[in-house]
Amino acid sequence: MTVTAIVGGLASTTAYTGGVSKLVAESPQAALPLAGAALLANSIQYPRLLLIVAFISPALAQAALLPLWAMMLAGLVSSAILVRPGAGAAARDTSAGFKNPLTLGPALKFGVVFTGILFLTRAGSYFFGQIGQLITSALGGLIDTDAVLLSLAASFGENKTAAHDAVLCIILAAAANAVLKSGLAYLSRQPAFYLRLMAGFAVIVATGLVVFFVFGTRPILAF
């Protein structure tokens, strides 16, 4: 299950969370270990985002390094806390039917989503300044964090967005995406699953914001 969670985190955390939620609805006894697995998968999202932005804009990746790594660590700790002794048995009993969690297909093609989010973030920034960009990044995060990330990296590379604003937009997009996945978790109708997932997401986002506001966007490593 750990390997599946890592693969899900690298492929699509939204798809993985949706697939796990459906499984929990069918097998409530696996709610606890699957909540831990879902948080593990979502923890992998943050270094994956960092790696993507590092290829496009190393300077922005340096600025986002501390908050994103802190969010990953917060997710890993939350996941470990949720997996208690004895939970493995339920996970093994359920994992036999857990063949492919990536069953929630994207509603839109990535290219269309990226184009739309790119337009919205730039329009928001142009007409409403930083507040507009923050709002459109959060709204875009409800659909696809990768598209928001690429849009921000492009804007940062063109000197249209400051590093501080871009990193804050990334965190807000991730927070909005966590809200979406909390909704998917709620569809399981199993409080033991969705409440733990929501709590884990809250810890992750709060950690990212605290690290961001305390340490800012100072570079730590050179890419």
Image: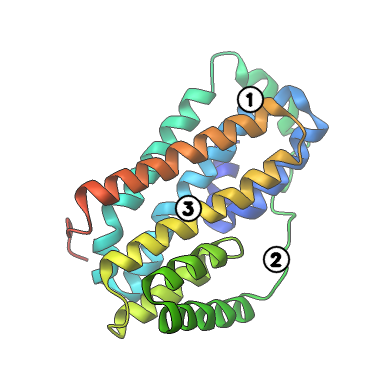
**Three-letter amino acid code at the position of disc 2:** Pro
Dividing the picture into quadrants, the one containing residue 163 is bottom left
Residue marked by disc 1: 32
| Mark nearer the N terminus (3 vs 1) | 1
What is the distance, in whole Å, between disc 3 and disc 2 at their CAs?
Answer: 17 Å
**Three-letter amino acid code at the position of disc 1:** Leu
| Mark nearer the N terminus (3 vs 2) | 3
User: Front-most of 86 and 141?
Assistant: 141
**Three-letter amino acid code at the position of disc 3:** Gln
Which quarter of the figure is the C terminus placed in? bottom left
Where is 199 relative to 138, above or below?
above
Residue marked by disc 3: 45
Q: Residues within 10 Å of mark 1 (few under 14, many from 20)?
A: many
Where is 42 relative to 122, above or below?
above
Residue at 34 percent across and 68 percent down: it is: 166
Label 2: state its secondary structure: loop
Q: Residues within 10 Å of mark 2 (few under 14, many from 20)?
A: few
Where is 20 relative to 134, above or below?
above
Q: Position of residue 53 (x, y in %)?
A: 37, 68
Label 3: state its secondary structure: helix
Left or right: residue 104 compared with residue 56: right
Residue marked by disc 2: 106
Q: Position of residue 160 (x, y in %)?
A: 32, 82
Label 1: state its secondary structure: helix
| Mark nearer the N terminus (1 vs 2) | 1
Residue at 45 percent across and 76 percent down: it is: 151
What is the distance, in whole Å, between disc 1 and disc 2 at their CAs?
Answer: 27 Å
Residue at 49 percent across and 31 percent down: it is: 79
Q: Residues within 10 Å of mark 3 (few under 14, many from 20)?
A: many
Q: Position of residue 20 (x, y in %)?
A: 69, 41
Which quarter of the figure is the N terminus placed in? top right
